[in-house]
Amino acid sequence: MTISYNWLKDYIKTSLSVEEIAAVLTATGLEVEAVEKIEAIPGGLKGVVVGEVLVCEKHPDADRLRITKVNLGTGEPVQIVCGAPNVAAGQKVLVATIGAKLYPIEGEPFTIKKGKIRGQESLGMICAEDELGLGKSHDGIMVLDAAAVPGTEAAKYLNIEEDYTLEIGLTPNRTDAISHYGVARDLYAALRNMKGVTDVSLVKPSVDNFKEGTQSATIQVTVKNTEACPRYSSIEIKNVKVEASPKWLQERLAAIGLRPINNVVDITNYVQHELGQPLHAFDAAQIAGNKVVVRLANEGEKMVTLDEVERTLSANDLVICDSEKPMCIAGVFGGINSGVTEKTTTVFLESAYFNPVFVRKTARRHGLNTDASFRFERGCDPSMTIMALKRASQLMVEVAGGEVVTAINDICPSEIKPQHISFRWEKAFTLIGKQLEKDVVKNILRDLEVEILSETEEALELSIPLYRTDVTREADVVEEVLRIYGYDNIESPSAMRISLQAAQKPDVEAIQNKVSDFLTSNGFSEMMSMSLTKSKYLELPQDAGEGKDTVVELLNPLSNDLAIMRQNLLYSGLEAIAYNRNHRNPDLRLYEFGKVYHKYNDKYHEEKRLALFLSGRRHVESWNNSNDDVSFMDLKGAFENILKALRIAGAKYQAYDGAAFDDALECTVGKNVLARLGCVSGALLKAFDIKQAIWYAEIYWENILKMIPKADVKYREPEKFPSVRRDLSLLLDKHVKYADIERVAIESEKKLLRSVNLFDVYEGKNLEAGKKSYAVSFVLQDSSKTMTDEQSEQAMMRIQKALEEKLGATLRA
C-alpha cells in the first residue's frame, strides 16, 4: 500500500522526518518496505532562484542577445547573457544558477555551467517556462510578479512541494491501516508512547461544513440481502459540474500512483484512500425506474463492467441494480453504463458495508482485484459509511459545485456492535513477559481508541473499535499493547525455563541443515520458490507419475500463473535459471528443499524433495582457471558426496528414460529410488528460452531419510599392514559397464579386495569393432598380516577368471 508523506501530515502533526516515521511504523507492525522521493517538477527546481534584472543592454557582437546584470539576493549582481526577446530591466525572473540541473519539456536534461557567449561572460540562465519543465511555452522568459523577492528559491515561490511515498507491506489483518488516516491514527498512538516525543497531535478529517438537504429522495433504495450487505448508506447531489479536478486533488492522487479522471470520481478515490471506505458514484439519470436494489444476481445474468468486458454473474454475486439491470458488482467493480460522465448533473452517492466473504469470493470468481475489493474483502469499518459519505458530499459541493438535496439514507437493519473483551492483568503480563505500569497500558488502549467500559483490580472490560476487525481475543489486545509499548523495550529475563525433550532420531532438521551447509560451502546457493505454479506447464513434457491426471488444482485460483500445485521442483528452478541468465548471471549452482503435490486415485499426496541445478562454467572466470563448463560428473559428484556425508551405502545406478531429461540415471538403494539426475531435455530448455545445458537432480528426500543408518558411527583402527595395488587392462564388449566389473570383482574376492577404481577408458583405433578398453586398479589388503606375492597373485587370478567367465573380458596385450 502506498502512502504519501505530505498527505499523511494533513492528519498527524509532528516534526519527525519521513525516515523517522518509517522507522516508527515498521517497529509497530506496519512494515515500510521502501521510501521513495517524488517531485512534481523533475529536479525540484534546485538551484533556480528569483532574480531581478537591474541592467539590460544590447550585446555588442550579436543583434538578438542582451547582456543583463541580475540581482540574485546574494549581494553582487551577476552577468547573464540572454537571448529572450522580452527581457527588460526591472523584471523579476527565474534564474538557473551555476550547477543547477534543468529538465526541459523537450530534449535531454542539462547542467548550467560558467561560460562565454560571443565573448561575453555568462554566469547563469534566465529561464523560460519550458526550460524549467513548468509548461510548453517558449515565447520568452517567465516574468514574475513585481512583489517577488530576489534570492527566493523557485520551488518555494511557486509553491512546489517535494513529497515522499512510503510503501507499506500491509498484512491482511491490518484493515485499520488501509488508509492515510488509519496510518496516522496508528502512528499517533505509537508516538504518544515514545519517550522524548511531545509535539504530536491527530487531526481527523473535518465534515463540519456538511449540510443535509431537505428534499425527498427521488431514488428508492431496497436491500434484499442484508447478510451480504449489512449496511447501505446513500445521498443525492444535484447541479454537479463534472470537469477536471483542482491541482491539489490531482497532486494527492498522482502522489500515490492514481490517474486523475474527473472531479467526482477523483473525490471518491480521495476519500477511499483518506478514510479507507470505498464509495461509488452513479449517474442518477442512468438509474432506470429511480430504484436501487441490492440483491444477489440471477444465475447466468450478464453485465458489462467498466473495462468493457461482458461478465456472466453467479447466483452468489451481490449486485447493485436498478429496476431493469445490474449496474455494479457490489464492492468489486462498476458497470459501464451507470458511471459518471461529462454529461452527469445529478450524482447518487453510495457508501456501504459489504460482507467480506461475499466480496472475496466474487472478486476471485471473476478474477478482479480492485482498490475497493482489496478493502471490502479484508473487512471495512461499518461505522465509517456515514462519515465517508459526508466527507465526499462536502468535497463535491466545494470542488464540483454540487448541492446536497436529500438527507442521508442509511439502511442498517441490525446494529453492528463492537467486540467486548476481558483483559486480565495477570494473563497480559505473563504473555508480555514483563510487569508494565497499569496506567501506561490504559493510556496505550485509549490512544488506540479502545474504550474501557469498567475496571477492577484483576481486569479491564474493553470495547474494541469496529475498525479493528482483527482484535477478537484477549491475546490480540495484549499484542496491541505490546507493539505500541515496543518489543525492544521488553528485556530478556536473566533466567529462562525450558522443558527438555528427547531428540527425534533421525533429527530431520539437523540432517537437512547438514546437507544445506555442505552444498552452500561447495558453491551452491539455496533458492525458495512457491508451491503454486502455472497451469500451462502441464503442456510441457512430463515424467511418469506426473501430468494432468495427477495434478492438484486450486478450486478458486488467484490467476492462471498460480492455478496448480507443483508436481516437481524442475520448472521453478528453470524459471530461476532463466531469470538469472537474463540478468547476465549464467554460471549457477542452485539447490532447493521443497514439497511436491500429486493426486492419485482421488487421494492427495505430499512429498518433500531436494533439487540440484548446475549450469555454466565450472570455475569462476580467472586467468588461472580453465573455462570448462560443468558436466554430469559435477552433478553426480555433488549427489554422491551427500550420500557419503549421510553414510548411505549401496547406491546403484541404471539408465532412466524420462521426458524431462535427454540423458539421465536413476539411483536406487534396494527398492528405494533416491534420485534421478541428468541433462534437462532440449524441449524444456526451449520452452524456458534457455540456451545452455542444465544439469539437474531431483532427490527423493524422504527416501534419503529412510536410508540413513540408525546406528552410531563405528570406529575402526587404521590398517597396520600395507596394501597392494594391481592393474588390469581389460578388453570388453561395448555394452559392458564399469559397474558390472566392480560387482563381479567384489563377488569373486570378498576377503582381500578393498577397492576397485576405473582410471582410463579407450575405444577407437586399434580395437576390434564393438569393443572398448577399461584400465582398472584393484587394491588388496590383509588386515592380519603382510600380504605375500603368492596371496596377491592368487586373488588377482580369481578376479581375472571371474571377469573372463561372466563378462567375456580379455587382457589387452
Image: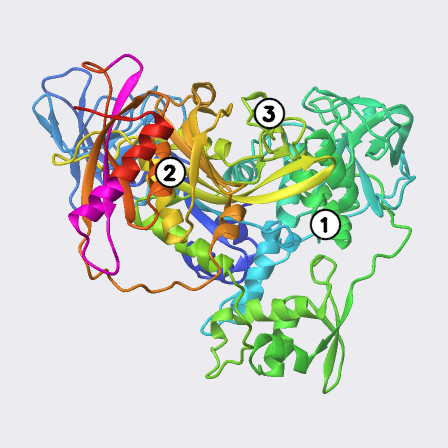
Residue type marked 2 = Arg
**Of the pair 575 and 461, the residue shown nearer to us:** 575
Residue range corresponding to the magenta coloring: 768-796
The N terminus - image quarter: top right
Identify whether 243 is placed above or below 159. Answer: above
Q: Are marks 1 and 3 in contact (CB under 8 Å)?
A: no
* Residue 613 left/right relative to 330: left
Identify whether 185 is placed above or below 772. Answer: below
Q: What is the C-alpha distance between the residues marked 1 and 3?
A: 36 Å
The C terminus - image quarter: top left
| Residue 685 appears in view | yes
Q: Earlier in the sequence, mark 2 or mark 3?
A: 3
Mark 3, residues whose alpha carbon is within 10 Å: few (<14), some, or many (≥20)? some
Q: Which residue is mark 2?
A: 743
Residue 538: mark: 3
| Residue 92 appears in view | no
Residue type marked 3 = Leu
User: Residue at 72% across / 27% down in the picture?
Assistant: 340
Q: Earlier in the sequence, mark 2 or mark 1?
A: 1
* Residue 582 left/right relative to 100: right
777 falls in the magenta region: yes
Q: What is the C-alpha distance between the residues marked 2 and 3?
A: 41 Å
* Res 89 quadrant in image: top left
Tell us which disc is closer to us: 2 or 1. 2
Residue type marked 1 = Gly
Q: Which residue is mark 1?
A: 379
194 falls in the magenta region: no
